[in-house]
Image (cartoon, grey):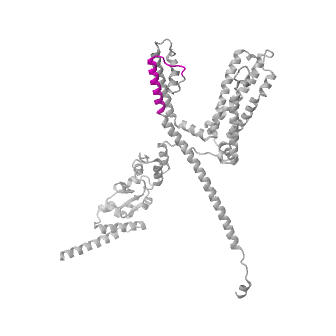
Amino acid sequence: MMNVEKWKHKKNTEKKRIFKNGASSSTPSKATSSSCSLISNLKLLVSGESCSDGVFSRMPRDCYDNEDLFEKTGAEERDQKVIINVSGLMFETQLSTLNRFPETLLGDPAKRMRHFDPMKNEYFFDRNRPSFDGVLYFYQSGGRVRRPANVPLDVFASEIVFYQLGHEAMEQFREDEGFIKEPEVLLPTNELQRQFWLLFEYPESSSAAKTVALVSVFVIVISIFIFCLETLPEFREDGDFTPGVDHVLNGTRDGSSPHPTTKAIVAYLTDPFFIIETICIIWFCFEAGVRFAVCPSKSDFFNNIMNIIDIVSIIPYFVTLGTELATTPGDDTNSSQNMSLAILRIIRLVRVFRIFKLSRHSKGLQILGQTLKASMRELGLLIFFLFIGVILFSSAIFFAEVDEPQTQFVSIPDGFWWAVVTMTTVGYGDMCPITMGGKMVGTLCAIAGVLTIALPVPVIVSNFNYFYHRETEQDEKQMIDAATEAQKSSVADKYDSATSLDKSTWNAPEPRDPVRDKWF
């Protein structure tokens, strides 16, 4: 019995000595360090451990500022372990690994101390567990961002924001995942130029900009309609394709004049199609000229494909007009006339590109263009596969039908058209195999064409869905922002009216009571 009492007395004395030594040796300079040291010492008393090097090696250096005590333990920063608990999943790394990026949540001691659990001597985060594999890899690899395969894109993006990995990490993540970087919107510095730029370039900016966009769309539709209508036989002379040119060239065919007569030129200039076309061209020139005059960057203006389309759609009008009016007397031969007609037809055919001007005002065409731009690699592979298939099956069909007298495949180049039509599953029927071997080749060609076209299509559809949903989300965000701003403005107006009412009530003089004034 005496031995037991002596043992208890010795144990209590040892605990008091440990508490006294621990409290005196870890005098903190900050309130946070004081609380951490006190709790750590209480843990030592409860566990009955002595102040050994192993105990201090498990304590994070953030909990004390006494450098002498830390040096006495013999532990250095590169050897100190840090335990991170992410929703019950334990991670262990070195403190020096986290300190590589001091601007992040885990790299900044002041930021990560808010998540420190002194009772368990660990950092606790109630976050997505699989995502932390990529976060920890960011510190271990020196700044490389890799999303775990089983983590969705939006979840990992939110984890990057929470752990404050930085803007560069987010940009690297977006680039690795195939996100297209949003171009920076440039606006003119001059206020007047900025207003005109928004008026012609951003239809959503104001009601006037929407009106300008509607006028532009109307003019484009009229121009395309006239382009198609003037090719009808009722509006052509001598079955010629190019209207307007006949008036000028026919003036040289009657033999009365070696050069275009004034009557023919007047007839051309008063042609209804020419007048409507001239009005459309005036609007196109005015629109393109204003855009060029007020654009913030002239180089970016010419690098924009939409501006190039605007210029290309205008050029045929002036080339045609100059060619028709500058016909010389020596150009009255049939060969020169036919050459002029051929050149003018090719130039005027460029007018069909005006239909792409609608993409400036159509979100659907913009999405289609962005999809094709993002899928250029897949489209290139598709064309390459079709090219290989055309060469193989046109050669096969030629040798399969070479002994047939009535065959239509007299050479391999003649089989190119048949192979393209068959692989794309169009099947015009103008060329078809006759022999059994040729029919087998045709069957294989059709099957190969279906498989070749079907392989890259899912990637293209995926790109289209991405751009479509991104555009839809942007529209919804704009609507929500507009509704929020309207709600804020209405609340502010109500608050201002209520405040003014309170001020008027407060400042109003209180009616005087003669009885009260008499007694008080």
Out of 56 and 437, give the one closest to the viewer: 437
Out of 133 and 464, give the one closest to the viewer: 464
In the drawing, does residue 342 fall left or right of residue 31? right
- Whole-percent x and y of residue 399? 45, 16
Q: Quadrant of residue 266?
A: top right
Farthest residue in the bottom direction? Answer: 519
Farthest residue in the top direction? Answer: 405
- Whole-percent x and y of residue 90? 36, 55
Q: Is residue 471 shown to the viewer in this render?
A: yes
Instruction: Determine whether 202 is above or below 224 in the image.
Output: below
In the drawing, does residue 76 fall left or right of residue 335? left
Instruction: Count the marks.
Output: 0
The C terminus lies in quadrant = bottom right
Instruction: Tell whether position 454 is magenta.
Output: yes
Q: Residue at x 39, y 52 (%)?
A: 97
- Whole-percent x and y of residue 109? 42, 59
Out of 402 and 488, give the one closest to the viewer: 402
Majority secondary structure of the magenta segment? Answer: helix
Q: Residue at x 55, y 23 (%)?
A: 428
Give the magenta-colored segment's residue range: 429-455
Instruction: Determine whether 377 is above or below 236 in the image.
Output: below
Q: Residue at x 61, y 36 (%)?
A: 305
Q: Is residue 30 shown to the viewer in this render?
A: no
The N terminus lies in quadrant = bottom left
